Amino acid sequence: MHIRTAAMDDVSKIVQLYKEVARIKGGIARLENEITEEYVENFVKKSIADGLILVAIHPEDPERFIGEMHAYKPGIHVFKHLLSDLTIAVHPEFQGRKIGRTLFTIFLEEIALNRTDIGKVELITREGNEKAIKFYQALGFKIEGRMEMRIKTPAGLYEADIPMGWQNPNFEF
Ligand SMILES: CC(C)(COP(=O)(O)OP(=O)(O)OC[C@H]1O[C@@H](n2cnc3c(N)ncnc32)[C@H](O)[C@@H]1OP(=O)(O)O)[C@@H](O)C(=O)NCCC(=O)NCCS
């Protein structure tokens, strides 16, 4: 599997991937019709400028992505040491094949080794996504609270969102 950082001309391939991931409920928060060119362009731009964005390329078709992961600095001084708005998405046909784990491992290694300006990486995941919570804990993320009634499920019920954080062992204060 080939993983590299993304560039602005990858936007349409990321839109395609996110639409396919969003088709399956219970994963990423956005619905398929909320995956717009503008939404993707915005996070790609911010992640390239002040964050990190990785893409995993399809083994047989370099024009398709099978995974993507990004996070970026929120943009104001008091949050200068944070990467936030983290999202990871693996194509449904490729889930469960260690692509998510590989993306996360490379992402956190890159920060620990080369981004000593980053003290913390934040993410938020829905309470019902237990597999994802366990996965993030195994990578070193800690649960930092509970945001009640934050998510409205497709069934019209409400569930909590769980904020989690990972601290960079090599952060230079
Ligand atoms: C969650 C997700 C990124 C995991 O990536 P993946 O490549 O499927 O997972 P991996 O094969 O690397 O497995 C890593 C861990 O993720 C968990 N996992 C696997 N499939 C999963 C799924 N469909 N949903 C949630 N967690 C999953 C497993 O517990 C696994 O742990 P293990 O290695 O100890 O068995 C991926 O399934 C996905 O994109 N899901 C839909 C979107 C989503 O939920 N994004 C996260 C929102 S916070």
Image (tube, rainbow, N blue to C red):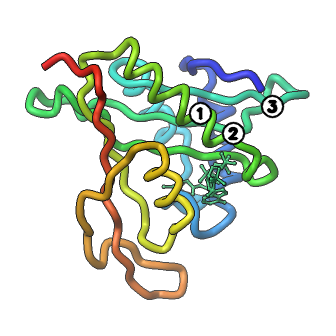
- Tell me how far mark 2 sits from mark 3, CA to CA: 11 Å
Q: Is residue 102 left or right of residue 73?
A: right
Residue at screen point 57% across, 21% down: 6
Residue at screen point 69% across, 30% down: 56
In primary-sequence order, the first of circles 1 and 3 is 3
Pointer 2: what residue?
A: 99
Between 144 and 157, the residue placed more toward the observer is 144
- Tell me how far mark 2 sits from mark 1, CA to CA: 6 Å
Choose top left, top right, bottom left or bottom right for residue 46: top left
Pointer 3: what residue?
A: 58
The image shows residue 108 at horizontal and vertical percentages of 45, 29
Three-letter amino acid code of the residue under disc 1: Leu
Q: Point out the residue furthest to the left here.
A: 78
> Could you tell me how many numbered marks the image carries?
3
- Element assignment for label 3: loop
Depicted 159 relative to depicted 168: above or below: below
Three-letter amino acid code of the residue under disc 2: Ile
Q: Quadrant of the N terminus?
A: top right
- Tell me how far mark 1 sits from mark 3, CA to CA: 14 Å
The reply to whether the residue tagged 1 has its Cβ within 8 angstroms of ligand 1 is yes
Q: Is residue 145 left or right of residue 7?
A: left
Q: Is residue 66 left or right of residue 163?
A: right
The image shows residue 30 at horizontal and vertical percentages of 51, 59
Residue at screen point 28% across, 36% down: 167
Crowding at dot 3, Cα within 10 Å, few <14 / some 14-19 / many 20+, comes out as some
Depicted 99 relative to depicted 50: above or below: below
Q: Are marks 2 and 1 in contact (CB under 8 Å)?
A: yes
The image shows residue 145 at horizontal and vertical percentages of 23, 64
Between 27 and 104, the residue placed more toward the observer is 104
Q: Are marks 1 and 3 in contact (CB under 8 Å)?
A: no
The reply to whether the residue tagged 2 has its Cβ within 8 angstroms of ligand 1 is yes
Pointer 1: what residue?
A: 103
